[in-house]
Amino acid sequence: MTDLSIKKGTELTTESITPAELSAFRKGLLRWYDKHGRELPWRGTRDPYRIWVSEIILQQTQTVQGWDYYLRFVDRLPDVKSLAEVPEDELMLLWQGLGYYSRAHNMQHAARQIMEEHGGTFPREEREVAALKGVGPYTTAAIMSIAYDYPLAVVDGNVYRVLSRYLASDTPIDTTPGQRYYRTMAALFLEEKQPGRYNQAMMDLGAMICTPKSPLCDACPLRDSCRSRGTELIDLLPVKAHRTRVKERWIDYFLLLHRGQIAIRRRDSRRGIWKGLYELPNEISDREPTTLPTPTRGWEIRETMPLPDHRLSHRLLHLRVHVCGTSGDANPTYPDGTEQIPLSDHGTIAFPKPLRHFLDHYSAGNRLL
């Protein structure tokens, strides 16, 4: 076993790793993968389109959640052409609940790039893949290695974690020098004869064994040479230099309900966390409100329903829905930019996840004012 006296702060270089260690790392990893690798619906394909779809879905989504989304997506949009041509509302409905909706917008933009610049055929050159909208170095490496056996190492959260612990490196992963260091090390360890298989093995090792908390070190195929095993470094690595500051927002939604119809409006499709989705009219504050908000003139709040807080990577959203009705039979006034739909049709429109859950629950209660 490697001497565990190595101290945090000692950064290994490419010259520090012997050919024998590299060979043992690759063989041990691939043997483990052959026996324990996950069976996933996008595994076993060389179709770059399907590999691309799976990687984009999994960028900000856990594998368990992404599984069904992937199957629905490729069933409805089986190729580049269908993605390029699908109406935006239908695309958003397919993506509803996955979050980070810019991913879907970028995919459609990239599909149109492929149609216009490559005749509808997914590109095979690294520079052409990397030029697609929303495709960064990680996704480029995944597509090129898995679809085309091109020797590019993927570097994502799983790979950062595996390598930082294996190398006992406290180089921060969220700095430019740190990212350069781990890209260099990832390329060094890559099995260039089987890059796609190797990259998938590294992803699975990080997801299944070298987990963020309570890693299963005794089951790890790299345990005999891991420089952090048996030390406090396991719980400290990887290191980040910066913490994301989480900002709080308070959002008051108004369910303007009249004769079974509700008011909705579409969010800006160019910016924002839920761009292109539909929402209820609302008020947003940076401070916790001390009183109830005032709905549009002619409406009055009949009931206020707090929703669970919704946490994003950089936001903590405190949410309430105010169910509003009107007095009398006159046609009510609606906020500018809204349209009216039957409440019963809400399921055909893409809403942010918190509103989707609320509308599903509220509609099921059949509580129409």
Image: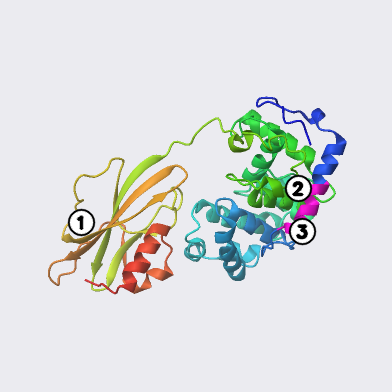
Which numbered disc covers residue 221? 2
Position of residue 15 measured from the top left corner of the image (x, y, whole percent) = 82, 28
Q: Which residues are magenta?
A: 27-37
As helix, strand or loop, the secondary structure at mark 2 comes to loop
Position of residue 232 measured from the top left corner of the image (x, y, whole percent) = 62, 33
As helix, strand or loop, the secondary structure at mark 1 comes to loop
Which numbered disc covers residue 296? 1
- The image quarter containing residue 111 is bottom right
As helix, strand or loop, the secondary structure at mark 3 comes to helix
* Residue marked by disc 3: 35
Residue shown at the point (68%, 58%) measured from the top left: 51
Q: For the residues marked 1 and 3, what is the alpha-carbon distance in whole angstroms?
A: 61 Å
Q: For the residues marked 2 and 1, what is the alpha-carbon distance in whole angstroms?
A: 62 Å
Position of residue 199 measured from the top left corner of the image (x, y, whole percent) = 73, 49
- Camera-side residue of 203 and 78: 203
Q: Which amino acid lies under the numbered mark 3 shown in the image of this protein?
A: Lys
